[in-house]
Amino acid sequence: METPRAWIDGGARGNPGEAGFGVVFEIPGPGGVSETVEICGYLGRATNNIAEYAALLAALAFAARRGFEVLTLHSDSELLVRQLAGSYKVKAPHLRRLHQRALRLRGAIPRLVVRHVRREDNHHADRLANRAMDERLPPPAWLASEIDDARLG
């Protein structure tokens, strides 16, 4: 069986500004049929980095809820990927809370691989983040406790 994969993106129109996130999962199934799951949400006023972390938290929370033991996650945020890897420090106090929450959720997925991708290779998650902002789509209720800090900015 192939590895489940997720693409994440967050965005803000202005920095800070109206913000949202998008997550796309490809989950392999029996007979080579994949399930696609889309998750997105409007955050209100937030920074781009907060929106990127909201996408990460959404992906990790979903994977943990589904009991994934392995996941390959793709992000076009070099800052987020390097902060997760520990090669960049998390200096901003408002990001430290989100980073700590991400590390806690990450612990539920024993074989998590986080990869940096070019922005043009992340168009589906980007479209979802923009849709969340355009339509002010609320995040799923099951995600509220994980992204409260992101929504508060």
Image (cartoon, rainbow, N blue to C red):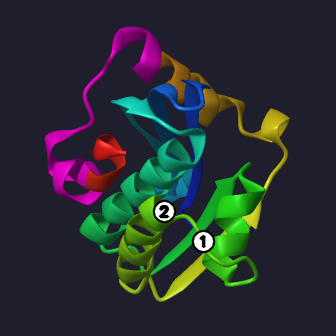
Q: Are marks 1 and 2 in contact (CB under 8 Å)?
A: yes
Q: Indicate whether residue 4 is drawn in magenta.
A: no
Q: Quadrant of residue 138?
A: top left
Could you classify mark 2 by the number of other residues whose Cα lies within 10 Å: few (under 14), some (14-19), or many (20 or more)?
A: some
Residue 134: which disc?
A: none
Residue at x 48%, y 62% (from the top left corner): 95
Would you say residue 33 is visible in this rendering? no
Please indicate whether residue 108 sits to the left or right of residue 81 in the image.
Answer: left
Please indicate whether residue 2 sits to the left or right of residue 40 in the image.
Answer: right
Residue at x 80%, y 38% (from the top left corner): 119
The secondary structure type at the circle numbered 1 is loop
Residue 95: which disc?
A: 2
Q: Quadrant of the C terminus?
A: top left
* CA–CA distance in space, label 1 to label 2: 8 Å
Q: Nearer the viewer, residue 33 or 120?
A: 120
x, y percent for residue 73? 61, 62
Please, is residue 23 above or below residue 15 in the view? Answer: below
Residue beneath label 1, please?
91
Would you say residue 95 is visible in this rendering? yes
Extent of the magenta region: 132-148
Please indicate whether residue 65 sits to the left or right of residue 22 in the image.
Answer: left
As shown in the figure, which amino acid type bears the numbered disc 1?
A: Lys
